[in-house]
Structures are given as C-alpha cells and as structure tokens.
Image (cartoon, grey):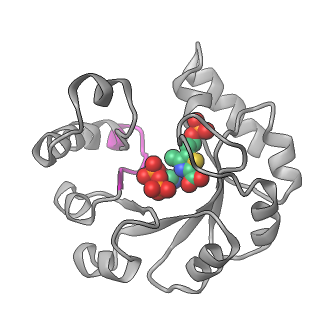
C-alpha cells in the first residue's frame, strides 16, 4: 500500500498511522482472497503491526538492517535504488531481499526524481538477487525494458490510470513472460 501523491492524499491529507493500519486490515482480506502479498511502503512499525508480507524502503527511510530489527527475518524487505552505488549496496546487503532500479523514464508519479534510465537496468542485468525495473513503464515500453535485461517491472499509472486495469495488468504480465 502506497498513498503518496494519491487523489485521496491530495483531498484528505496523509493517512495517520491508525488509518493506515485500518486500511491494511481490509487489504489483508483482499490479498489473501487472491493469493497475493501485502506490501507496506516505508514504515517498518506499520508493516509489523499489519502482519505485512513485504516492507518496501526508500533511500531516506530506515536502513534495511534497522528495519529488520523491527520486522524480523520473515518479512520480505525491498529497497528503491537510483544509481549504481545504491544498487550495488542493495545487492551486497544481506538484510535486502529484492531491489528496484529507476526511474527508467521521468514519471509524474515521482515528480522531480532524476531518471537514471535504462543504463541502470543494464548495470544490474544478470544479478541473481531479485530486482525490478520501475518508473515510466507501460506495455509499449516493456520490450525496451526487457531488452535492457529486466524480467520484472513495477508500474503505477500503467494499471491505475488504465480504462481497464485488469486487462492492462494481464497485458503487462504477458509482456514479461
Ligand atoms: C516495489 C516498490 N517500489 C517502490 C515503492 C515505493 O515508492 P516510494 O516510497 O514513493 O519511493 P521511494 O521512496 O521508495 O523511492 C514501493 N512501495 N514498492
Ligand atoms: C514509486 C516510484 N519509485 C520510483 C523509483 O524510481 O524508485 S519511480 C516510481 C513511480 C512509478 O510510477 P509509474 O509507473 O506511474 O511511472
């Protein structure tokens, strides 16, 4: 769950911790019904209390080893990276289970974030720790992302802004298969 910059956040302000926990409790039921994973953004304390499967950390959040002290060993911990040094630090860090590289293209979902582009995807292509390309990706761009070496991708608008989100997700999945 990630509320940053959402229409709800713009209208009502950032979620308080208690509100976030209440929403995560509802989402737990939904993800379980679909055999999916519940992922919490940024906050190790909330991930622990929500019984999340995944905690995703940015470069300005708790460091992975600090977050591990809160969530323990069973939660999957991922990290956003935006340059080669950050990516190689995530690869070498035993507290990190997966990492993301991006933005592949500048994206309004992350305003102001400089895009390292597909060069960073090529930098980590072939690394065995699981990793995802992120930022500005849609079905049309997926072949380029794959050609650069990615086999997994994270998208926001390509699904949330699609007329038919389920069809968009299916098309993206097919493009990564
Ligand atoms: C898989 C995945 N990637 C990125 C995010 C996080 O988004 P955000 O918190 O806006 O960005 P960073 O601070 O991590 O760069 C996520 N939740 N999941
Ligand atoms: C949440 C996020 N993190 C990024 C990073 O580079 O770490 S890019 C990004 C936004 C991705 O949204 P869209 O698919 O709409 O471009």
Of all residues shown, which one is farthest toward the front? 112
Residue in the picture at 36% in, 44% down = 1
The residue lying toward the viewer, choosing from 85 and 163, is 85
The boundaries of the magenta stretch are 31-41
Residue 91 vs residue 52: left or right? Answer: right
Residue in the picture at 71% in, 34% down = 138
Residue 123 vs residue 97: left or right? Answer: right
User: Per the image, is 164 magenta?
Assistant: no
The vertical placement of 110 against 37, above or below, is above
Q: Quadrant of residue 159?
A: top right
The vertical placement of 32 against 140, above or below, is below
Q: Quadrant of residue 124?
A: bottom right
Residue 100 vs residue 96: left or right? Answer: right
Residue in the picture at 28% in, 38% down = 27
The vertical placement of 137 against 72, above or below, is above
User: Per the image, is 39 magenta?
Assistant: yes
The vertical placement of 30 against 81, above or below, is above
Of all residues shown, which one is farthest toward the left? 18
Residue in the picture at 37% in, 83% down = 65
The residue lying toward the viewer, choosing from 45 and 15, is 15
x and y percent of residue 3 in the render? 34, 38
Q: Quadrant of residue 92?
A: bottom right
x and y percent of residue 2 in the render? 37, 43
x and y percent of residue 78 in the render? 48, 66
x and y percent of residue 4 in the render? 37, 40
């Amino acid at each position: 769950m990630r509320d940053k910059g959402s229409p709800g956040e713009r209208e009502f302000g950032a979620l308080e911790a208690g509100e976030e926990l209440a929403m995560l409790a509802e989402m737990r039921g939904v993800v379980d019904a679909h055999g999916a994973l519940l992922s919490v953004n940024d906050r190790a304390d909330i991930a622990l209390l929500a019984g999340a499967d995944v905690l995703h950390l940015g470069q300005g959040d708790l460091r992975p080893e600090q977050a591990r002290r809160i969530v323990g060993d069973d939660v999957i911990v991922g990290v956003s990276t935006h340059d080669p040094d950050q990516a190689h630090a995530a690869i070498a860090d035993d507290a990190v289970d997966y990492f993301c590289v991006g933005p592949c293209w500048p994206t309004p979902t992350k305003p102001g974030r400089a895009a390292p582009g597909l060069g960073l995807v090529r930098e980590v292509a072939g690394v065995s720790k699981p990793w995802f390309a992120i930022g500005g990706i849609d079905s049309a761009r997926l072949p380029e992302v794959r050609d650069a070496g990615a086999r997994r991708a994270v998208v926001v608008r390509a699904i949330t802004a699609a007329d038919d989100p389920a069809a968009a997700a299916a098309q993206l999945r097919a493009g990564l298969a």
